[in-house]
Amino acid sequence: MNKQGTFRSRLGTYGGPVLVILWTLFPVIWILSLSFKPESGINNQKFLPDSFTLENYRTVFKTPLFTSALRNSIFISLIATVLSVMIATVAAYAIARLDFPGKKLILSLALAIAMFPAVSLVGPLFDIWRSIGLYDTWLGLIIPYMSFTLPLSIWTLSAFFREIPWEMEQAAQIDGATPWQAFRKVIVPLAAPGVFTAAILAFFFAWNDFVFGISLTSTDAARPVPAALAFFTGASQFQRPAAAISAAAVVVTIPVVILVLLFQRRIVAGLTAGAVKG
Amino acid sequence: MTATTTAAPAVGIPVPVSERARNEKRLGWKLTAPAVIVMLAVTAYPMLNALWLSLFSYRLTDPAAREFIGLRNYGVVLSDALWWQTVVTTVIITVVTVAVELVIGFAFAMVMHRVVFGRKVVRTSILIPYGIITVVSAFAWKYAFALDSGFVNNWFGLGDFAWFGERWSSIVVICMSEIWKTTPFMSLLLLAGLAQVPEVLQEAAAVDGATWRQRLTRVTLPNMKGAIMVAVLFRTLDAYRLFDNVFIMTAGAQKTETVSFLAYRQMISRTALGLGSAVSVLLFLSVVAIAAVFIKGFKVDLSSVRGR
């Protein structure tokens, strides 16, 4: 088809990809451009700044609201990711390797929770967390993040674990390896990419969350970045927050872009794991 | 490594089948228990709690006046025009975004499937909107359309048209942000489905003289029906709980409140736990209803399509 060299197919070969890249990068470049606009030029109503400044970045890193939110977001997301992936790995191993009743039920439960409307939970959680002292704490966010990242992790990992040639573990043991050696030297390297994929997706969820972040926190003690952005006013309350928010947005977008650039194939594999028969 | 015969794996020891099966069963439950407990602790228990609270007239600011009123909260919600307005807004946004995303997502999936030039760049860039925080996307689109900082009005010569000054233009911008952010997810699911369509069928159809359009509608689409339905179901459920974009762009002003936003406002801002819980339960029930319609009505086979 591509060899026909018609205008239409050439458009498909080059135009398509260019269009996709434009689509994905346009708003990102816009927020980047906004973050470099000086206070006086923020309303120039142009896509690009007239003059560049790093002042907005200095402002956000001097704003305690942002720096504490950044610290909260990083630690809460990382802790939730590690815990969730650990629990999911164990569960997915059991689902992939063992035969026990209730397996299908657990997978269905995970699927149901993945579709659960989070907002319908924040009211009761708000009430419960306040009465048991979890309101406005790291743990108060880590727990819901774990519950909502577990389904995707379990699905990704159990799909992945099914593909691992487990006989190799026994083969290593027959060759004289202890069960621990067989596990560490044979199974861990095979399973690591899947675990890693699940971890990235779980991290994205926790990093992105707004619903829990805004409902279950009230101070700098635990408020994560997305919720903090909604409260942002800039250096002083008289300053327009657009430039500062954009700078803050760019800062929290950088880790995501780096992860995407480094692990593109794994993320795609994880997102579509088991989405089709295979 | 020295081969020792004494350290034979446990498999070699003769164990009665029933006991081994029982051990396996017990181990399976033990290994999955933590996951099940964590998943249920934050969903099932609070949901039951919401169900219970929804039967009371209960405001956090006045706990002493808490009183059992049966289903009256539901009556209040369902007879309120505001509830129906939020439902209409949510349904419109859901239908529009999912339909547009399906078309664009499919086009993107085709591009990614066929792309030769810059394959890796395209597949990497498509993940960027997926990874970006929804709130950040909301701000980017909000500022692009805003009267003071925006470039859109300037580019298209719209003068001082206030996008966030009325209902439908606000909804348009909300939809744009939502579509931009979630189309990549849709297109990746569709790409996975596209990869399942046998190339042989395409070639056979081409040899038989089928046009591009015929191959698309007679070969490609029917063969990836499963993937399309799953992608649509996932996105529909996701779009129906839309919250972040509305919160950032309009905070529910200009009649853009969605069901999720209403539940949040009743519960957290107004601390009307009884009434808010009723809204939450109704939101939950509508999501269940949507899923049921898809799974029973359209026969989306999740067990066979999403893993097994």
Image (spheres, coloured by chain):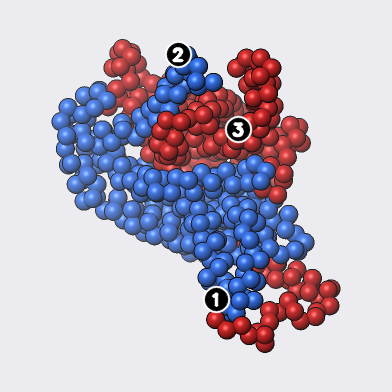
* Amino acid type for the residue under numbered disc 2: Phe
Asked whether, in this view, residue B290 is left or right of residue B173, the answer is right
How far apart are the alpha carbons under marks 3 and 2? Answer: 24 Å
Q: Would you name the residue on which mark 3 appears?
A: B194
Asked whether, in this view, residue B229 is left or right of residue A254, the answer is right
Chain seen in blue = A
* Amino acid type for the residue under numbered disc 1: Gln
> What's the residue at 59%, 38% (across, down)?
B192
How far apart are the alpha carbons under marks 1 and 3? Answer: 41 Å
> What's the residue at 33%, 14% (across, down)?
B156
Tally the marks: 3
Do tags 1 and 2 sit on the same chain?
A: yes
- Chain B in the picture: what colour? red
Q: Would you name the residue on which mark 1 appears?
A: A181
Q: In this view, does A106 lie above or below A245?
A: below
Q: Is residue B303 visible?
A: yes
Q: Position of residue A210 (x, y in %)?
A: 45, 45
Q: Which of B29 and B178 is in front in this view?
A: B29
Q: Give the SS element for disc 2.
A: helix
Q: Would you name the residue on which mark 2 appears?
A: A7
Q: Is residue B63 above or below residue B146?
A: below
Q: Where is residue B187 in the image (x, y as percent from the top left)?
A: 53, 33
